[in-house]
Image (cartoon, rainbow, N blue to C red):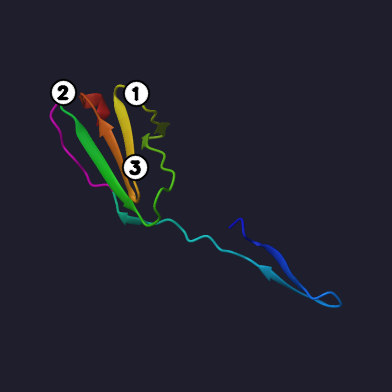
Amino acid sequence: KSDSDTYTCDIGDAQSRAKLVVQEIPVLFKQELQNEEAKEGKQIKLTCELSKPDTPVKWMKGDTVLYASEKYEFKQHGTVAELIIRDVKSVDS
């Protein structure tokens, strides 16, 4: 997208200009999150796959943004984003 601009070919006495507009490819889910069940005290991993590698991902529980902590760990490898929830409790549902 940052390559979008007006480009010029200059031969001294004349110029030719063209505008380049680069459209971003929308990021889609190749694999959406799946419902999971876990026993209290266990660890669970939620995984989704995106269509564009290394896309920034924000994990949320309801309307609350999650942050890395002893409870939550985030991993991302190319197009795969993972949320690991440690020591799950009923309030994590």
Up the image or down, 43 lies above or below 17; here it is: above
Kind of residue at badge 3: Gln
Q: Which residue is mark 3?
A: 76
Q: Decide: is 73 above or below 19.
A: above
Q: Quadrant of the C terminus?
A: top left
Q: In the image, what residue occupies the spot 15% across and 33% down?
A: 38
User: Front-most of 89 and 23?
Assistant: 23
Task: Quote the CA–CA distance across marks 2 and 3.
Answer: 24 Å
Question: Which of the two discs, 3 and 1, labels the residue nearer the N terminus?
Answer: 1
Q: Label 2 is placed on what type of residue? A: Gly
Q: Secondary structure at mark 1?
A: loop
- For mark 2, does the 10 Å Cα neighbourhood hold few (<14), some (14 to 19), or many (20 or more) residues? few
- The residue type indicated by label 1 comes to Ser
User: In the rendered structure, are the residues bearing label 1 and label 2 in contact, judged by CB atoms less than 8 Å apart?
Assistant: no
Q: Which region shows up in magenta?
A: 33-40
Alpha carbons under labels 1 and 2: distance apart:
16 Å
Residue 10 placed where, x, y %? 78, 72
Where residue 85 appears, as percent x and y from the top left, is 25, 30
Residue 2 in the image: x percent, y percent?
Answer: 61, 55
Residue linked to disc 2: 41
Q: What is the chief secondary structure element of the magenta stretch?
A: loop
The residue identified by callout 1 is 69
Q: Considering only order in the chain, which callout, 3 or 2, is on the residue closer to the N terminus?
A: 2
The quarter of the picture where residue 31 lies is: bottom left
Residue at left 43%, top 56%?
A: 27
Q: Nearer the viewer, mark 2 or mark 3?
A: 3
In the image, residue 45 lies in the stretch drawn in magenta: no
Of all residues, the one furthest to the left in this rendering is 39
